[in-house]
């Protein structure tokens, strides 16, 4: 049965006639101007075909995880709606990383101009060679869980059956995560 466009908006149907999926993407940068890089990346993701950013967390200054000899990161998490498949979404995020000058193939934990990770894709579980969803490290990292908890505390991790709030209360990671005041991040506009 055809829907009017108003109804389509309401129940999240897209031009393919599918329901769109709610996802969460982690954003991070510690090269150049990290806050500006994160804002730029969010705008680029929002302008990408088949993806809309519907909410973002505050920005946070975070202590580097793994290799402590590098500069602090800026991290945030955004909620998206997408009609892309998980593979298409990864491809789009990697194109944004490349367009922003990210060089791949460096060592793990190396400084990066931008890092875009798929945290959740609805309640789907993906375990492909190049793509794991939920992101396999998200429950171990305060720099992901703190911003995620700000915008999605009651979202359930589909592999563990535990909410973000619950994961955060159990975490071992003690690295520092400091909110950047809305005043300073508002220079970059709000979403
Ligand atoms: P990391 O984010 O772990 O620091 P990279 O950004 O360099 O490292 O990602 C390395 C690879 O991780 C990517 O080439 C991608 O194929 C893979 N990958 C697996 N699962 C995900 C995911 N959920 N989100 C983003 N990349 C992922
Ligand atoms: Mg990544």
Image (cartoon, grey):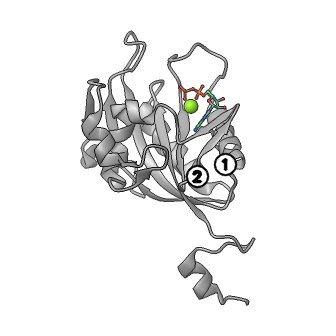
Badge 2 marks a residue whose secondary structure is loop
Identify the residue at image location x=67%, y=88%. Answer: 3
Residue sitting nearer the eye, 164 or 63? 164
| Residue 129 found in image quarter | top right
Residue for badge 1: 86
Would you call the spot at circle 1 few (<14 residues within 10 Å), some (14-19), or many (20 or more)?
many
Identify the residue at image location x=36%, y=33%. Answer: 143
Where is residue 24 shown, x and y percent of the image? 49, 50
Residue sitting nearer the eye, 31 or 141? 141
Would you call the spot at circle 2 few (<14 residues within 10 Å), some (14-19), or many (20 or more)?
some
Q: In terms of sequence position, does the residue under pointer 1 or pointer 2 come before the other?
A: 1
- The reply to whether residue 59 is in sight is no
* Residue 125 shown left or right of residue 181 in the figure: right
| C-alpha distance separating marks 1 and 2 | 9 Å
| Residue 5 found in image quarter | bottom right
| Residue 48 found in image quarter | bottom right
- Residue 17 drawn above or below residue 67: below
Where is residue 123 shown, x and y percent of the image? 53, 55
């Amino acid at each position: 049965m055809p829907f009017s466009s108003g109804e389509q908006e309401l129940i999240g149907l897209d031009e393919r006639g599918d329901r769109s999926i709610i996802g969460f993407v982690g954003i991070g940068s510690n090269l150049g101007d990290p806050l500006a890089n994160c804002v730029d990346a969010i705008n680029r993701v929002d302008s990408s075909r088949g993806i809309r950013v519907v909410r973002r967390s505050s920005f946070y200054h975070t202590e580097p995880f793994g290799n402590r000899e590098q500069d602090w990161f800026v991290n945030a998490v955004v909620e998206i709606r997408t009609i892309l498949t998980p593979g298409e979404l990864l491809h789009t995020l990697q194109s944004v990383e490349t367009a922003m000058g990210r060089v791949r193939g460096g060592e793990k934990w190396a400084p990066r101009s931008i890092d875009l990770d798929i945290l959740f894709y609805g309640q789907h579980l993906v375990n492909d060679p190049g793509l794991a969803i939920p992101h396999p490290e998200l429950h171990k990292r305060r720099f992901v869980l703190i911003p995620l908890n700000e915008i999605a505390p009651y979202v359930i991790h589909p592999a563990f059956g535990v909410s973000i709030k619950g994961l955060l209360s159990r975490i071992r990671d003690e690295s520092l995560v400091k909110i950047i005041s809305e005043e300073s991040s508002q220079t970059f506009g709000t979403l």
